[in-house]
């Protein structure tokens, strides 16, 4: 396949707003690619070179790219800058100033050159690589190559749309659950595409977990009481819910990799876990999961989540690790010595995990109780809350590990305060307002936020958020949003609201609110007959959640369930006055008016 053909498909995808049409175009594109090309087509369509868990980035700034354009086209950098100011998109600038026909490069050739640019270390090497690439492309091709290099392809295609296209490619859309399963087990849509090309739907049936490919993490549903936990699960495992960073640890011999909740490779952040895994665990090949928490050894208290995330920006991680040592509370085992454990019942996975983890200094087992008694669940809940933890996680004993899915196999029961929702909501920032008064001076005073809708692969607005951040945080947020400003609404954002500045849906923040209401202003859960859902009195409870991707935000369906839960809790509340929980402190409440 020629790179030109890929660029032509990109243009057609850009021109459509219909999800179905988009998926069908992608299907056609994937069909025309060879088996050896199809994974690259998938990555490039998603605006990447490789699945994001490989951590490969171009490392090319706009400035560097303008320098390369100027050198390739023989015009002054100043001129390129002026054109950029006018057009607002370096892809369009490239299309305008690259005047030659190009050499009709193969897709694989362009991919190889792009990889070389990403892998080269020095700026000079990168510029030379870019110049070389631009010389071989036409203006039309250069437009897309430049956008890919800058991470600004923005075709409006997310993973869910590619999954749709891959299901169509397998012939029959009933194959979709198999495509989703394969994706959930390896997080690499390029690999899934290649398997389909090589072996059709049959290859998907045989798809298995592999060390080195992160498994999309299983998620928990919420309930409002200990009683509901037992009603749903009967005899179950009840564990402490730690408020830290979820990690998936992969080991193959001497090689260890660690992935975060959004499947980013974070191995470098946790040298003590790497050491503990190599020294304290006997098995050579496994995948396990746990929650990393920074523990104050002297007081026994947990440090806040931010203390962990700071490691991301530290150069001297080892030193920082000595100051804030962490523990990994292990709670699941997904693969062991060639065997896929995701299919085994939870209780078997846990038993094996207990054999594997010899309580050392860094690796620990999550605190757990097996019970079918409501009273025991409640007293366990109170015990962990008094230790300063968030609440409990209850797990169905006979359930497999449902990769990438949220269901009642895992249930969370969190302690929150009266007058708020039963849980916080993770929302994606899609735009912002300049704000009034003191905020106007900061250049940002409020956010428009959205939920994820996996059915349409879009982001639907649910609220404005104007409180919860300090002045410094507002300033930092504005700076972080700066490179992601858009001249109009992003193609994957569905909004009736206007904003001062639209931004790419990229950053997730966690908010709390007093309640969920129905509102005609927002698109989350809106249908032609019914208004949408909105958050009342929302406030941010965390800064940007770097461990979550926009697709990891709360989904519209989840919010609707939370809305139903809210109604239920408000009626349950009055009946439970004799409960030995102290309602003013620990009730999982969501009072509606
Ligand atoms: P939430 O982020 O509120 O949806 O809660 C689910 C998260 O709780 C998981 O993604 C884990 O990061 C975290 N967690 C803490 N303790 C446990 C545990 N014992 N079992 C499973 N997940 C846990």
Image (spheres, rainbow, N blue to C red):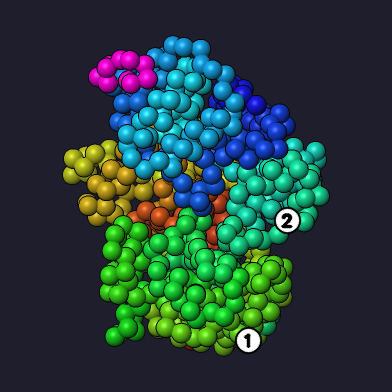
* Residue indicated by mark 2: 207
**From what the image shows, is residue 202 above or below residue 88?**
below
Label 1, ligand 1: CB separation under 8 Å: no
Residue 204, image x, y percentages? 75, 51
**From what the image shows, is residue 84 above or below residue 147?**
above
Quarter where residue 237 is shown: bottom right
Tell me which segment is drawn in magenta.
Answer: 70-79
* Residue 39 vs residue 554, the one in the foreground: 39
Q: Residues within 10 Å of mark 1 (few under 14, many from 20)?
A: some
Residue 470, image x, y percentages? 24, 55
Q: Residues within 10 Å of mark 2 (few under 14, many from 20)?
A: some
Can the viewer see residue 295? yes
For the image shown, how many numbered marks are present on the structure? 2
Which of label 2 and label 1 is nearer to you?
2
Residue 238, image x, y percentages? 57, 80
Q: Residue at x 63, y 40 (%)?
A: 39
- CB within 8 Å, label 2 to label 1: no
* Residue 177 vs residue 113, the one in the foreground: 113
Point out the image quarter for the N terminus.
Answer: top right
Q: Secondary structure at mark 1?
A: strand
- N-terminal-most mark, 2 or 1: 2
Q: Residue at x 60, y 49 (%)?
A: 188
Q: CA distance from mark 2 to mark 1?
A: 35 Å
- Does residue 468 appear to the left or right of 462 in the view shown? left
Q: Is residue 462 magenta?
A: no
Q: Residue at x 60, y 85 (%)?
A: 355
Which mark is on residue 371? 1
* Residue 570 vs residue 148, the one in the foreground: 148
Can the viewer see residue 585? no
- Does residue 586 appear to the left or right of 46 in the view shown? left
């Amino acid at each position: 396949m020629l790179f030109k053909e890929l660029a032509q498909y990109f243009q057609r995808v850009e021109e459509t707003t219909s999800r179905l049409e988009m998926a069908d175009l992608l299907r056609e594109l994937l069909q025309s690619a060879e088996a050896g090309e199809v994974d690259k087509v998938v990555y490039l369509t998603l605006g990447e070179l490789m699945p994001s868990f490989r951590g490969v980035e171009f490392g090319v700034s706009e400035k560097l790219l303008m320098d390369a354009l100027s050198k390739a086209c023989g015009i002054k950098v100043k001129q390129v800058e002026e054109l950029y100011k006018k057009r607002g998109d370096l892809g369009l600038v490239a299309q305008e100033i690259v005047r030659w026909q190009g050499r009709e490069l193969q897709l694989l050739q362009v991919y190889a050159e792009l990889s070389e640019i990403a892998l080269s270390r020095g700026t000079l090497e990168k510029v030379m690589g870019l110049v070389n690439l631009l010389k071989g492309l036409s203006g039309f091709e250069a437009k897309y190559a430049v956008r890919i290099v800058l991470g600004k392809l923005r075709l409006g295609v997310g993973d869910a749309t590619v999954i749709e296209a891959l299901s169509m490619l397998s012939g029959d859309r009933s194959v979709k659950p198999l495509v989703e399963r394969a994706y959930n087990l390896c997080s690499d849509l390029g690999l899934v595409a290649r398997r389909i090309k090589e072996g059709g739907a049959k290859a998907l049936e045989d798809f298995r977990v592999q060390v080195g490919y992160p498994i999309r993490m299983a998620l928990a549903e919420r309930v409002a009481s200990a009683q509901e936990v037992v009603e749903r699960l009967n005899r179950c495992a009840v564990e402490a819910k730690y408020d830290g960073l979820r990690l998936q640890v992969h080991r193959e011999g001497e090689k260890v990799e660690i992935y975060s909740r959004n499947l980013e490779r974070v191995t470098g952040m946790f040298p003590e876990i790497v050491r503990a895994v190599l020294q304290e665990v006997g098995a050579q090949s496994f995948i396990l999961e746990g929650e990393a928490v920074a523990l104050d050894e002297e007081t026994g208290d947990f440090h806040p989540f931010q203390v962990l995330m700071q490691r991301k920006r530290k150069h001297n991680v080892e030193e920082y690790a000595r100051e804030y040592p962490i523990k990994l509370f292990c709670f699941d085992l997904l693969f062991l010595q060639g065997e896929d454990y995701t299919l085994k019942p939870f209780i078997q996975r846990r038993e094996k995990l207990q054999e594997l983890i010899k309580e050392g200094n860094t690796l620990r087992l999550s605190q757990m109780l097996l019970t079918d008694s409501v009273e025991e669940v409640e007293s366990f809940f109170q015990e962990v809350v008094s230790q300063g933890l968030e609440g409990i996680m209850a797990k169905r004993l006979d359930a497999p590990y449902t990769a990438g899915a949220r269901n009642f196999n895992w249930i969370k029961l969190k302690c929150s305060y009266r007058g708020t929702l039963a849980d916080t909501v993770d929302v994606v920032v899609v735009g912002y307002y300049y704000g009034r008064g003191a905020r106007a001076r900061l250049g940002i005073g409020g956010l428009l936020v959205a939920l994820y809708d996996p059915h349409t692969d879009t982001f639907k607005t649910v609220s404005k958020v104007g409180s919860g951040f300090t002045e410094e945080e507002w300033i930092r947020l504005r700076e972080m949003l700066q490179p992601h400003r858009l001249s109009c609404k992003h193609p994957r954002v569905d909004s009736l609201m206007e904003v001062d500045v639209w931004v790419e849906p990229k950053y997730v923040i966690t908010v709390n609110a007093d309640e969920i209401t129905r509102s005609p202003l927002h698109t989350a859960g809106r249908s032609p007959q019914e208004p949408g859902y909105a958050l009342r009195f929302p406030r941010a409870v965390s800064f940007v959640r770097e461990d979550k991707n926009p697709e990891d935000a709360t989904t519209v369906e989840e919010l609707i369930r939370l809305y139903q839960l809210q109604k239920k809790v408000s009626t349950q509340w009055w009946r439970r006055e004799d409960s030995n929980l102290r309602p003013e402190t620990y009730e999982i409440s969501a009072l509606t008016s």
